[in-house]
């Protein structure tokens, strides 16, 4: 039976570094998994991919030893169970607004008598050399709080039996709690947003579950860990690719000066 290495990292008192995959490609997943992250999340909600891409991405990451997670599109049992059967060791579920919704989500990740997950770990059983109901103790159920309703019910959600953590997406949290006053984005500096983010961390600590935060930079992730967050996501494939390409192009144009402007190089 497999063991979830994230639980060992947390038990040792260390924070988890999580990567993010939004491009539906196994080679991209393999590249990211080889870079030293503790875990990597495949974003099935907003990523340019579906289950047919998720499965080979999980396969490609296996050789690195990174812990594979998946963010599902919604609190829907079919995709949650299918992602787990494909080998995800944890599920991040968006837009949970109440304790009842959190309990429903948790039930989809656990086999009876602790939930209603259907048994059929087709790839997981092969990938992990066996897979039984002991998976209940290894699979992570992490909910996202992104709305005013979710914040209003934060304490009750955090106390949900079987819930392993809460993941903060700062972009939706800003949209969902500030009535459109703030633009979406990571690494919030507004005092009211920092207060909400830290409120989530405090509720997690109070209930003995893990607090997770999506960050845009390592510097902000360090601040979040200082606040007590247990997992920070720093960088994803699409943003890292865009940033590296942009920096390379800018450097080339800076070095070439005026000759690098479009239409002035005179061919090859």
Image (cartoon, rainbow, N blue to C red):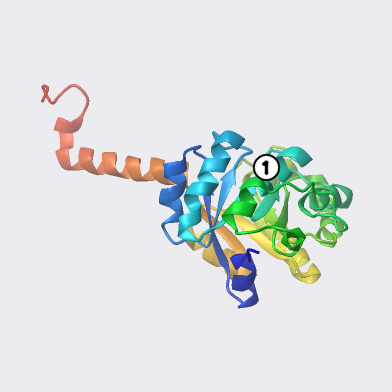
Tell me where residue 18 appears, x and y as whole percent: 54, 58
Using the image, determine if residue 254 lies above or below residue 115.
Answer: above
Q: Residue at x 49, y 52 (%)?
A: 61
- Residue 186 in sight: no
The foreground one among 83 and 91 is 83
Judging depth in this view, the residue of 62 and 186 nearest the camera is 62
Q: Position of residue 218 (x, y in %)?
A: 48, 60
In this rendering, the answer to whether 198 lies above or below 253 is below
Q: Nearer the viewer, residue 162 or 214?
A: 162
- Check disc 1 and report its element: helix, strand or loop: loop
* Residue 239 place in picture, x, y as percent: 45, 43
**In percent of the image, x 78 and y 64: which residue is there?**
203
Q: Quadrant of residue 261?
A: top left
Q: Residue at x 52, y 48 (%)?
A: 59
Q: Relative to residue 198, is residue 268 drawn left or right? A: left
Q: Please identify the quarter of the rendering in which residue 28 is found.
A: top left
The quadrant of the image that shows the C terminus is top left
Would you name the residue on which mark 1 appears?
72
Relative to 196, say whether 12 is above or below: below
State the residue in front, 46 or 206. Answer: 46
Vertically, is 186 above or below 23? below
Badge 1 crowding class, 10 Å Cα cut-off, few under 14, some 14 to 19, many 20 or more, is: many
Residue at the (33%, 41%) spot, across then down: 245
Expressed as whole percent of the image width and height from the top left, the position of residue 235 reads 48, 51
Q: Is residue 43 left or right of residue 256?
A: right
Quadrant in which the N terminus is drawn: bottom right
């Amino acid at each position: 039976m497999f063991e979830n290495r994230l639980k060992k990292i947390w038990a040792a008192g260390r924070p988890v570094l999580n990567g993010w995959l939004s491009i539906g490609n196994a080679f991209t997943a393999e590249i990211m998994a080889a870079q030293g992250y503790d875990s990597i999340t495949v974003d099935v909600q907003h990523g340019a991919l579906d289950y047919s891409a998720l499965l080979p991405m999980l396969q490609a990451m296996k050789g690195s030893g990174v812990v594979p997670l998946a963010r599902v599109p919604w609190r829907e049992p079919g995709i949650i169970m299918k992602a787990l059967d494909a080998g995800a060791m944890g599920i991040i579920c968006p837009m949970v607004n109440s304790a009842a919704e959190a309990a429903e989500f948790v039930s989809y990740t656990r086999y009876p008598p602790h939930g209603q997950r259907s048994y059929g770990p087709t790839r997981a059983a092969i990938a992990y050399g066996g897979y039984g109901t002991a998976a209940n103790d290894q699979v992570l159920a992490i909910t996202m709080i992104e709305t005013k309703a979710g914040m209003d019910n934060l304490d009750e959600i955090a106390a949900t039996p079987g819930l392993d953590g809460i993941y903060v997406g700062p972009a939706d949290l800003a949209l969902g709690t500030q009535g459109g006053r703030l633009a979406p984005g990571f690494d919030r500096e507004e005092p009211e947003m920092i207060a909400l983010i830290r409120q989530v961390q405090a509720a997690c600590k109070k209930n003995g579950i893990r607090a997770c935060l999506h960050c845009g930079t390592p510097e902000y992730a360090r601040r979040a860990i200082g606040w007590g967050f247990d997992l920070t996501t720093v960088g994803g494939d699409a943003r890292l690719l865009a940033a590296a390409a942009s920096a390379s192009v800018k450097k080339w144009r800076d070095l070439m000066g005026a000759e690098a402007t479009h239409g002035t190089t005179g061919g090859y």
